Structure formats: structure tokens, C-alpha cells
Image: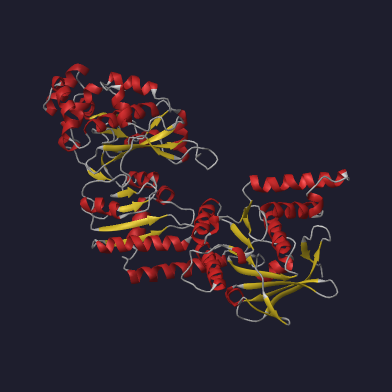
Amino acid sequence: MLIEEDKIGLSRIKTHPKRLGIPLRRWGRNLISQCPFHAPEESSLFFYDSLGYWRYRCLQCGNDGDLVEFLMRSRFNGLDEKTARKEALDFWGASEADLKSEEENLHEKEIGGAKARVLECFVRYCHWAASKSESTAEFLKARGWDLAQAQIYGLGYYSGDPEPFYSYCLLSGLERHEVSFYLDNLDISHEPRLTIPARNSKGIVHSVYGRLLDNAGTPNSGEEPYISYASGPLDIPFNIQQDIDNPIVVEGFFDALTADLAGIPGVVSTMYQPFSRSHLYKLKSCGAEGITLVLRKETNRRNQELHVRKCLELAESEALKFKSIILPAGETVDTIVRAEGGDFLLNMIRNTEEDTMRTHRKSVLLQDIRENFNTAMSRDADSDVGFQLSNFPALTHALDGIQPGYYFLSSDPFGFKSYALSSFALDLVEGNPDAKVIYVALDSPRRQAFDRLVAMIAGVSEADVRKQNKDDSINEKIHAATQELIGFVKSDRLEIWEDTDTFKFNLLLKELQTELSEKQKLILIIDGMDHLRISDRGDIPDLNERRSSAAIDLYKELDIPVFISGSVTKDGDKLIGPRPYLRDADATFWIERKEDGALWLTVNLKNSGSTLYEANLLFSDKSYRMKEKEP
């Protein structure tokens, strides 16, 4: 049964649990007490205001209702229902005849007006719909919640079909045009979603968010995991409350909700938005004297550290105390509180020192040192740290795998450097199923890179790949190799880029950051560094210095392996230029064809002058794919 509108006015305006005269204590944003219906010694009775008025629910015996019903059942249970209801209404000092006018005036008095009334109606409708939705119950169960707990926070279910809701609105006295005006994004998605009401510090709903129930929202699904059904401010922290002296700022909705359900006071969420000055002002207006920022660990630790530093600067500019906590990899506030309990998180916060710019640098450094040690000790002694090159086992072992770094490769004859990088690219894709290679072809058209890779997979010449062959067996090999290359691209394991205006440094970096956010194990190969467009790095006058600095910045910013190739200057047997590449690269790869026709690969370490690896390579006379010669 839908919630009756004529009961809401009294419940919202005149009732509050503190008037019941029973022992209450604060539990997150809610109040908790002992349950008089099943076990007076058990504190499992929640009083909550998620629908715009106070209700009660026992999470053990399941009793629930509004506060009028609480009095009817707890104090007047010996009377018939009509008499008990009259006694309860008399207790609150109102009659049901007063309700309609009081209900109409409430929203006009409060900030939000008609919009708040529409959104409250949507929340109540979705609250009711959730009780009928099996998919909602399954989604919540997978996250460690049950429907009773979720409804304490007004979580609901929206099917994506607006017509039943429009009918409910008509019964509630709302016109269709009002609903369309204030719930202006109701038609943005027709997928079933969990609904999450967001309130301002006065408890008035300013937006309702929808979360997909099936963890979709990937780039290929066409649906965003979170949407807002009503246009509204994004800078009001979710779950914000009055009188929060030390708010705990987390990222996700369920991070805040799970912590609040565990009784942790003042937990708010930025709703996956970066913490900003606007968030800070709103928390400060609610009494914040200090901020604790709890973040999930990002792959790019450098970017995360810069973000925390900016947040620290914001807090210091407003004379607020500041703490920051980076959770262990793969953990969230939601998972930690469910596994360890609320006291575990609170103790973690208590044991964290307040940050200043100096102490922050120190704490980050200590955390990095410990993490570096723990990571090293978790690896098997016989394993390689980085990516595998399946056709270069000795090289892989010498480098301890292809790790994040800056590697420069050249050759004599010069064209062999493209065959070497193409061989590396195929080896990395074939031998590392969770990695992605981006091959940037700056020295040749992208079509030529296709031909080269297909020829290497098929074991035929590039000339064979470009036209139909009289030998059908060769055509079949080319077809199979082409399908394999297509498979690498479809599975997001390989991309081949060509020279365009987007390869200015700042645009290239932005594009790669997007790629890295979707594929954490990324390898970048730039074939033809001499042609990289870096006109936006005019602060460095020398062109080679500019390009080498760009390569270093890509490696440092992205923390991935970066291979580049370019031309070199030789003096006898010694490589002497371009000096920036030879100086800055972590390792220099030099491929040379000797007078006897043998092909040799030499790898020198940065600044040491020592040879890390030297080997005779085998290569196909047709495709020029390279591999180590077995000893």
C-alpha cells in the first residue's frame, strides 16, 4: 500500500522522537533505542527521518511505522484501533482535520518549496516500490544490506517507467507539469535503478540519484552507473547534517551510508566528485572544525598525493584541522566497516596524525616506504616483476620484466627499429593477457603498421599482405592473422595510433590518462619520437631536450613502460647523440646488423656505461619478426 498523504503533515510537523520521553541516543544521523515490542534490553529500534518525517523501524523484529503508530502500539495497545489512534493524536496535540493545511504550508515555508514536495513524493513512491522489487533486494544483499536497513535511509527503486509514478502523483495532488519541471531528468534513463535521496543540511531533498542495479555503466554499455533525476547542486556533500564538528569525507554513496548505519557520526560523501572549496564551505557552515578525508587508493599515486595536498591547502586556508587516510588497495570505507565494524574505522582516524604541509610529506613518504617493502616481499623470488617478452626470455630476465620506465631504441639499418618495436608489441600482447599496448606510429602511416603486424603474425612478407596471393595457403594465413589482430583490438589489448594534431604533448598526456583510468596495465610505444608534436613545450628551447623531457614526463605522470625510437649519431662503435635520449633513458636498446649478416641487440643501463644484455637475434627473412637465438 502506498504511504497515505493525509498522515504526512502531522508526522512531519508535530512529531519528534524526543517527545516520546524514552531513552534515545544518537546513532549516525539517526536515533536508536531499545525495542518495546520484542526485547526491551536490545537497542535495535531506529528512529529515522528519510521520507521527510520521523518513522521507526526495529531491525530485529521488523516493527515499523510512523510515530502515531508507535504510540498506538506501545502505549495504547489494549484499546481498539480507532480509540488508540485518537489517544495518540491527542498526545501529539493535533487532530487529523488540521493536517492538510499544515502540510500545504510546510513546503512553502521551507527552502525548496514546490520542488521539495515533488522530490519527497518521488522518494516515498520509490520507497514503496523497493518493497516489491526482487532485483533491489538482490542488489542490496550483494552489498551486505537488507531492504529494512536501506529504507531507513530512504533508498528505493524506480523501474524506469514514469507512468505509474505520474498516477501516484495525481493521487497525491501533484500536477504532471510540476513533476516534469522539477524531476527534469526523469526520462534520461529507462533502466531500473536504486534511488538515493540527497538532502541539504536542513533535511530537505535537493536531488534524487539513481544507481544501476547490475553494475553496468561501462563504456560499452551506454549507461552511466549514477544519474540524477533532478537537476541540482553537486557541491552539497551527501548525508550532510547540522552540528558536525569533525566530518569524515568519503567518496561513494554506500561508503557514507554503511558508516552511518554503523553509528559513525558526521560521515559525508562527495558523490565521486573531487573535494572542493564549495564542499568545505558547506561543511564549515554546519560547524566543522576539522576535516578527515578518506580516499580509496588510486593506481596513480602521484596524482592522488597532489589531490590530497590541494585539499590540505584548502583546509589550512580556512583554519581547519585536516587528516587524510589512503585506504589499502581494493578497500573502501564500505568494505572495511562491514568487515571490521565502525570502531575499526574510528580508531584508524584517531591514530592518524593531523596534517600540515610538512607532516603530510613525511607521512606519505613513510607510507610509500612501507608499501614498497610489503610489495617487494609479496613477490616470489623466481618471478619477474614487469611484463613478459615471450620471444626474449633472457632479456626479460635481465630487466626483471618490462617495468615502468623510459626506454630508448634505435638501430642500424634504421628501419629495423620499427620491426623491433613491432616484435615487442606483439610479444607483450600475446604474453600478458591483462595488459594493453598503445603503438604510436609516427614514422609511417597506420596502414603500414597494420601490414607489418599482420605479416609478423602470419610469418609472411608485407608485400604478401598487401594483395591476394596465388597460393591459397598464404591467403588463409593472412586472413587468420588479420582476425587475430582484430581480436586484440576488440578485446582492448592493442591500439595503433597515427600522427595527428592530438599528439601535442598536453593532449597526448590527457588521452593517455583516460586510457590508464580504464586499463591499469598499459604500455606505450612511440615509434618515431623525432616526429612527436610538442610545440606546447616552448619553455625548453632545444628540440631533442624537449622531446626527451616529454618522454620522462609521460613516464613519471603515468607510471608505465614507455618505449620510444629515434635516429642516433655514432662515432665509431659509440653512440653519441641525441644526448638527451641517451642520458635520460633508463635503458638504451641498440640493434645492429654486423658484416656477417648477424643481428645483435645490446642494452645499456642509464648512466652506468655497463652492458646489461647482449644477444644474437633471429629474425624472419619474410616478416622480419625478431626473437632471441637460443643458446
Asked if residue 506 is positioned above or below residue 141 in the image, the reply reads below
The image quarter containing residue 588 is bottom right
Residue positioned most to the right: 471
For this view, does 387 lie left or right of residue 112? right
The answer to whether residue 469 is seen in the rendering is yes
Residue at image x 28%, y 37%? 205
For this view, does 487 lie left or right of residue 66? right
The image quarter containing residue 226 is top left
Image position, residue 48 (x, y; %): 27, 37
Image position, residue 603 (x, y; %): 69, 73
For this view, does 75 lie left or right of residue 312? left
Residue at image x 69%, y 66%? 396
For this view, does 330 lie left or right of residue 623? left
In terms of depth relative to the viewer, which is nearer, 447 or 312?
Answer: 447
Image position, residue 501 (x, y; %): 54, 56
Numbered label tally? 0
Q: Quadrant of the C terminus?
A: bottom right
In terms of depth relative to the viewer, which is nearer, 599 or 629?
Answer: 599
The image quarter containing residue 452 is bottom right
In terms of depth relative to the viewer, which is nearer, 320 or 318?
Answer: 318
Asked if residue 171 is positioned above or below residue 324 in the image, the reply reads above
Residue at image x 65%, y 52%? 433
The answer to whether residue 63 is seen in the rendering is no
Image position, residue 314 (x, y; %): 29, 60
Q: What sort of colour scheme is used for the picture? A: secondary structure
Q: Quadrant of the N terminus?
A: top left
Asked if residue 133 is positioned above or below residue 469 in the image, the reply reads above
